[in-house]
Amino acid sequence: MFFVTALDNNIYFLLLSIVDMSSPLMYGTPSSRVEGTPRSGVGGTPARQRPDLGSIRKAPQVDLHSDADGAVASEQALGQKLVIWGTDVNVGTCKEKFQRFLQRFIDPTSNEDENAGLDLNEPLYMQKLEEISVVGEPVLNVNCSHVQSFDADLYRQLISYPQEVIPTFDMAVNELFFERFPDSILEHQIQVRPYNALKTRNMRSLNPEDIDQMITISGMVIRTSQLIPEMQEAFFQCQVCAFSTCVEVDRGRIAEPAVCRNCNTTHSLALIHNRSAFSDKQMIKVQESPDDMPAGQTPHTTIVYAHNDLVDKVQPGDRINITGIYRAVPMRENPRQSNVKSVYKTHIDVIHFRKTDEKRLHGLDEDSDQKLFTEERVQILKELASKPDVYDRLSSALAPSIYEHEDIKKGILLQLFGGTRKDFSQTGRGNFRAEVNILLCGDPGTSKSQLLQYVFNLVPRGQYTSGKGSSAVGLTAYVMKDPETKQLVLQTGALVLSDNGICCIDEFDKMSDSTRSVLHEVMEQQTLSIAKAGIICQLNARTSVLAAANPVESQWNPKKTTIENIQLPHTLLSRFDLIFLMLDPQDEAYDRRLAHHLVALYYQSEEQIEEEFLDMAVLKDYIAYARTYINPRLNEEASQALIEAYVDMRKIGSGRGMVSAYPRQLESLIRLAEAHAKVRFSDKVETIDVEEAKRLHREALKQSATDPRTGFVDISIITTGMSATARKRKEEVAQALKKMIQSKGKTPAMKYQQLFDDLRGQSEAAITKDMFEEALRALADEDYLTVTGKTVRLL
Amino acid sequence: MRMWFVCRFCCPAAQSNSNPEWEAKVLEYFKGQLREKESHSWVPSLNDVPLHYLKPNSLVKFRCLVQDMFDPEFYMGVYETVDPSTKANVLRCGKYKDVTECGVDLNSRNTVTAERQTFYCVPIPGESPWAKEISFLSAARVVPSTSYVPSRQKRSYEEDDDDMDTQPQKQREPHTGGMGETPQIQPHGNGDSKRQETEAPSSQTTAPSDCSSHLDLNFPLPGERGPACLVKVYEGLDSFKLNDTLEIYGILSVNPVLTVLGEEKDPSLLLLNPTESMETPEEQRAHDPPASLVPRLHMLYARPLQHNNPLLPSAPTEDQSAFVSSFLVEMASVRAELLAYLTHVLLGDGLAAEYLLLHLISNVYTRRDVLPLGKFTLNLSGCPLNSYTERLYQIVQQLVPCSYRLSMSLHTMNSMRLVPKKDYVANRLVSGALQLARNTSLFLDETQLEQGQLDSSGVRNITALGNLISWQKVDYDFSYHQMEFPCNINVLVTSEGRSLLPSDCQVPLQPQVTPPNMEEYLTTIHMAQFTSQINKFRVYLSLARTLDYSISDEVTKAVEDDFVDMRKDDPQSVTAEDLHRMLVVARLLSLSLGQTTLSRDGWMRAKHIDMLRRSRTEQQKSLNGNEP
């Protein structure tokens, strides 16, 4: 009747295979098994105990048994009036209702990934039962919101009396299942696992009224215990006559039989461990997620018990939604003490786990079910969106303490909204980047860090790192050995953590080259590849990068190009959609406004400020709403406008033999236009969006890609690291050098310094060592010569 | 006196009454009583009176900082007991109590489950000895007038006195002087028997304080002493925040049962009762420490403290406004005296003294999105080496109610925990040195820093200090994520050259005198001040910080014009940053003179001293530039 399995760490667990256990009222009460429960076709499939519903049996339930026994025979006649003691649940009606729910419930609008592949116009749960018969996993997950929309009263009963109602559901499902698939073989009977109970969302709002009710909370796993074998049934054997008896564990206690019923010897019974029944159990500590917490308080934790197959389903660090029954157990009463602590221990018995972050690894969009907006809130947001100046309003609401820099704020605003996510994987290009990346460079002390801090505080998935303090590992992911379990765990870094958010990187220029190199993949492909310690994977890092860099020479040198000023590789720079310079404009009117702004900052009261600007909370919700619900697409006119804009950009340069735009710039324009449409809550990208995108893009270019030597905007400064004129110069020097070497006749080897001096003497323009080396490199590339140490050889 | 009676009476009376109205009434009553003048000083304070002199289940107060907030717990608000002999059922009240009466009927339908939360509170970290002492003495003045076992009270002073032996001699002097003033009510007649009586408890107190070392009481600063307390909070849970400083009035509970329950470990029982075995020993130690060491306090009423300066009326009542207006008259003269004193201390450097004074009254008065306004971190560079900074700290400590000196040596930076960290095994927030109460003076001594390698924790600590200075926030480490806690800490950095940490303003010290014996020089300056004088300074510094401040439209205009003009002359040298700083300086300067609005004069003065300071730093720079 029992199987005993010994695990290596001396933990025994027993699979109960009690044949006769289908009555809902008998769940977990093997000692009170009753014959003659209604069952058809359940046949030889064993039922399994549900410790998650609790083995705590209240004494009054004895009354219930007599009721139930009587009811079995004449259920039709009497059943309608009988309810389970202490509740208003009638087993018969409850079962019927649930069967009706299973057979009829249709949810055509379902978008849960669990329902993928199911026909949404057919009864949902019947399809799931079919799935069970095929797959053989005897668990039926039921969404409580479905139950609620189908039968509100049934839902109420489920929430209020889960301990009684869920077994009834189990019974109903099994009857239905074995009627339909009489030949199915399952490991044990189907267990119903409801989830998404709407009653409670937040750990903080749990209160004494929730005790013994079904709740759903979200949180993060911080600790899991080892597997604990919990005794369900104790097996006693008489030392005298070998008579055996089973005693059920009640509230963690075993009532040891004092007298052997067979031979009447007192105190002769001994507990036989390996014939007792155990179930698996695991303690999990869950901490409330940081988003749910009021400021200035510490997060709460709750103890959760997982049973049987839910053991080891979650790992520390996982974010999960837990559906379970909230329990409060009085502290153990000590027989040796007369008074006890008046505190209860609380925990949750889990019925259902749902990881909320596992999707991040699978690349599905998770925003959809994250944030729920109330009707009124949506109304406020829509009202705001309908205002003609919403774009300006929002941009001025952004970091009000930072003065002016309107275009930069607009750029960051568009970054916050982001473009529309497009999928081209069918045509082989994969995902198209929708995130806007922005680089701010400029003099120290122009509140760049403050902007970054503000953005980091504004977005829910923001990460803030400083280039100085972060390593490649800290940005990407690393593999760590868990000290407790000795298991290798993938710890994600800032970039992965800010998936779907913004990663703010301060002091971008101070970052080491190796660290910066990981950004290449992230900023264009939006993924992160990891091959470490035997773990090879590709993580999504669909993060927008907002970086700030200081010029190399502490002060911005207007005579130099952007690249020369910040000394960043152009390959990386070209991945930024917008590059802004934050410089001091040095103009009187500006100074006056700045002074006014700052003084006002220092003496205006809090209320005055709030009247002037949009609330940060509204801005947050506005962005979240737009990101979730608005997916603008280009209309015909807008596409035409974009094409024109691109052609125009190309034209500007072509007159001077320079390329002033690359497809990457076109992509940037599209993203910016889409983001601008999102700001307006518009489903169409229209010409005005393109106009603004063009304007902003031009502004940023004007600042960052103007060739200081010629005064023209030259995109190649960003894309290739040097302006077209500079490239031309380089070419000239190389040619001059080649000519000079050729004029020297057949000398296979030359001294490096000698050559340099000669070239300097020959050329009319000043030639620096850098230029000379570049020229040498260019000739080496042509396979004309090689440089080894201090000698130059011709080939 | 009346208070004691009420308190001891109310609890048993309430037990037989399940009517929830009484709860509101009890609170109302206590609040009313405590509002009465002086009444709060009748209540003995856990800060001053050793625990074993306090009666269990009596009303006490505790001046503390909320160090950690534990999970909410459910308790039996109302429960039923069955008398084993008479079989009579009695309803009892579980509120404000840790332990139930005997014979609880767990299945009773009358049981009402209620919710409460536990806060782990520690005495305000870094509280200056003078603040402790004065509040202790003021309490002592009152207590003997009640009949509350004065002889025991009396003894406790001496014992506390012993505790203070660790402090430098000079601080002890005024203390003993204060002792003489307190009325000696108890004649020392039958001293012997009393001595015997008191000897035992005092030896007891040393024992727990020893064992407190292995039972970590989680004080934010090393070397702190005093009782930590588990405060059970019943009302207004959301109004309390971590790191709040509170004065809590509540019922003391030191039931030894609490300890016994915690220590008892019967392995066979544990096996069968998984709920209890789930708690790790660490967690049990953190959450259920012996009550003799960490008493429980059931909160009736808590008063948020704006400051912990015992010389000032603590509650914002009419009392206080009267006090403020009377002091405002004196303000300017006290300022002059204080400035002279600080000038002496800073070796005759008047400008540095001026800045130090402004720094000492600075305060983050509001935040604009992420930007804290009003902070004024001062970097005093060019400090003489050899214990000068240490003496300087001692003088600062004498002036402010809360302070801490962090000697930034390589070893401390690498090994010390500055940022609080959540320990998930013990399920508590392990404190760090940056978990400080508002307006604490943090004295960073960079002169102690030598060349060498900072390890990763050292880098983290430096980053944390930088964040603290720039944003006035500390990111607590919750292992899986970080959580930002705003703070309001006055940071003073002393260094040889320019500090490696950011600061709002750097003042190079230019000593005018070079005393041959620094130690002696500073001690003489300090001794020359009367206690009453020092007390005036203390009041002045705390008070100036609390004043309101505004700028009129007219002055705003003038400031704007001024800024534009300055930029015209030299746009490179005057930036928005400078305007930020000058506005803060102007604000502090006005407040230091007791002026609550900015005048044109005030602005010009602020500009002037900032200019002086800047020319000094320029000078320093060019000096250093020429040196190599």
Image: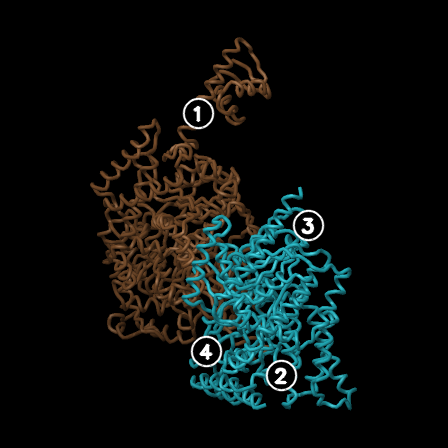
Chain colours: A brown, B cyan
Assess disc 2: are there few (<14), some (14-19) or many (≥20) residues with their C-alpha within 10 Å of its C-alpha: few
2 or 4: tag closer to the N-terminus = 2
Are callouts 2 and 1 both on one chain? no
Assess disc 3: are there few (<14), some (14-19) or many (≥20) residues with their C-alpha within 10 Å of its C-alpha: few
Are callouts 2 and 3 both on one chain? yes
Assess disc 4: are there few (<14), some (14-19) or many (≥20) residues with their C-alpha within 10 Å of its C-alpha: few
Q: Are marks 1 and 3 in contact (CB under 8 Å)?
A: no
User: What residue is shown with label 2?
Assistant: B55
Front-lying residue, B545 or B597: B597
Q: Nearer the viewer, mark 2 or mark 4?
A: 2
Q: Disc 1 and disc 3: Cα gap in Å? A: 50 Å
Amino acid under label 3? Glu
Q: Disc 2 and disc 3: Cα gap in Å? A: 52 Å
Query: Which chain's residue wears label 4?
Result: B
Q: Nearer the viewer, mark 4 or mark 3?
A: 3
Front-lying residue, A576 or B147: A576
Which residue sits furthest left?
A636
Query: Which chain's residue wears label 1?
Result: A
Under circle 4, the secondary element is: loop
Q: Nearer the viewer, mark 2 or mark 3?
A: 3
**Residue A704 vs residue A682: left or right?**
right
Amino acid under label 1? Arg
Amino acid under label 4? Asn
User: What residue is shown with label 1?
Assistant: A729
Under circle 2, the secondary element is: loop
- Which of the 4 image quadrants contains residue A420? top left
